[in-house]
Amino acid sequence: MSEDTMTQERPSLTAHARRIAELAGKRAADAEQQRRLSPDVVDSVLRAGFAAHFVPVAHGGRAATFGELVEPVAVLGEACASTAWYASLTASLGRMAAYLPDEGQAELWSDGPDALIVGALMPLGRAEKTPGGWHVSGTWPFVSVVDHSDWALICAKVGEEPWFFAVPRQEYGIVDSWYPMGMRGTGSNTLVLDGVFVPDARACTRAAIAAGLGPDAEAICHTVPMRAVNGLAFALPMLGAARGAAAVWTSWTAGKLAGPTGQNAVSSQDRVVYEHTLARATGEIDAAQLLLERVAAVADAGSATGVLVGRGARDCALAAELLTAATDRLFASAGTRAQAQDSPMQRLWRDVHAAGSHIGLQFGPGAALYAGELLRRSNDG
């Protein structure tokens, strides 16, 4: 059988996502209560190929495109934003691990490309050079899905320079610290290292990842500057959650408008309000999706350089603002029913706000990067 035939017969990531979304939706309430995803949801995402999405082909991965992630992650987010967050980040961390030296990559993926790698991306630890490697210590909060992880890619400072270090599960501790308002199912607990030895083969500079300088990189996904695409990982789950909120709102409102006639009927004025709310909210969601699809398309074309890096960061942040505004609009007009503890509407609303507060989606840094590049070009011209 040819490789092309095998590719055609392999279910798409979106098809897998639709199946997983049904399970994740059923488990969403329990994930909120337990503050972590259920093992069957975690395993389903791995089996679908999210973790392997950006893993180099040499290690059994697909080294695939950013565009291929947009719809699958959004589909998961419609049912459970925490599941979408996990799927999106585990794909992103697989891409980042591809910047380690070849020997380190081989160790991470020695059992196949589906290793669940989590990330501690802020340089909150310290690393001291020692023969053959490093001694790394630190405490990193907010490490999503860390309880289910196989490896962690953590950031620590060597002097004043941030480096990334890959550490296997048996070498780091976990503190139960995740008690948030939203995205409760992500299980983003605290990771702790105390003088753990990390060999040179499992270390790389943050500068290499930032610039998209993967060792012997062949796939475009390993040559993209980090800031051009970093916001995608966090914005795509928001896209799904906002779409999910719109679907719930539409179902409720359609039922209300098709209700009784006479004294209890919805007035023509109220109907117009509902119609305008839905049209504007879905327009905002569509606009956000178009922005995110453009970010992915630019990255996949290998053209994310200069001003396009800044535009990608800006677009992800702007998309997050649009998605938050759309979800707010829907929630505010949904009535008391939306605020019930068992309502998916209030869960999706909380999740969108929690995800939108991530540092990777703040508008200021992306705006400064993009506008600064435009102004520089104008001066040069």
Image (spheres, helix red, strand yellow):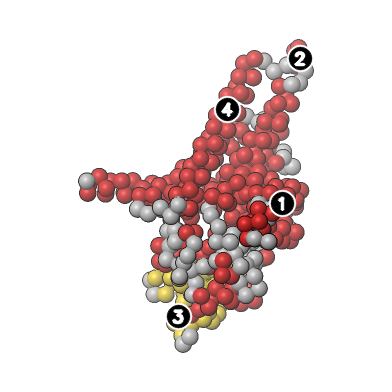
Instruction: Identify whether 60 is placed above or below 250.
Output: below
User: SS at mark 1?
Assistant: helix
Using the image, tell me which numbered label, if any, was put on residue 128. 3
Residue on which the image places disc 1: 20
Dot 2 amino acid type = Thr
> Residues under labels 2 and 1: Cα distance?
40 Å
Q: Earlier in the sequence, mark 2 or mark 3?
A: 3
Q: Position of residue 156 (x, y in %)?
A: 47, 71
**Quick one: which residue is furthest to the front in this view?**
1
> Residues under labels 4 and 1: Cα distance?
29 Å
Left or right of 352 on screen, residue 231? left
Tag 4–tag 1 contact (CB < 8 Å): no
Left or right of 36 on screen, residue 238? left
Badge 1 crowding class, 10 Å Cα cut-off, few under 14, some 14 to 19, many 20 or more, is: many
Do we see residue 189 in this rendering?
no
> Residues under labels 4 and 2: Cα distance?
24 Å
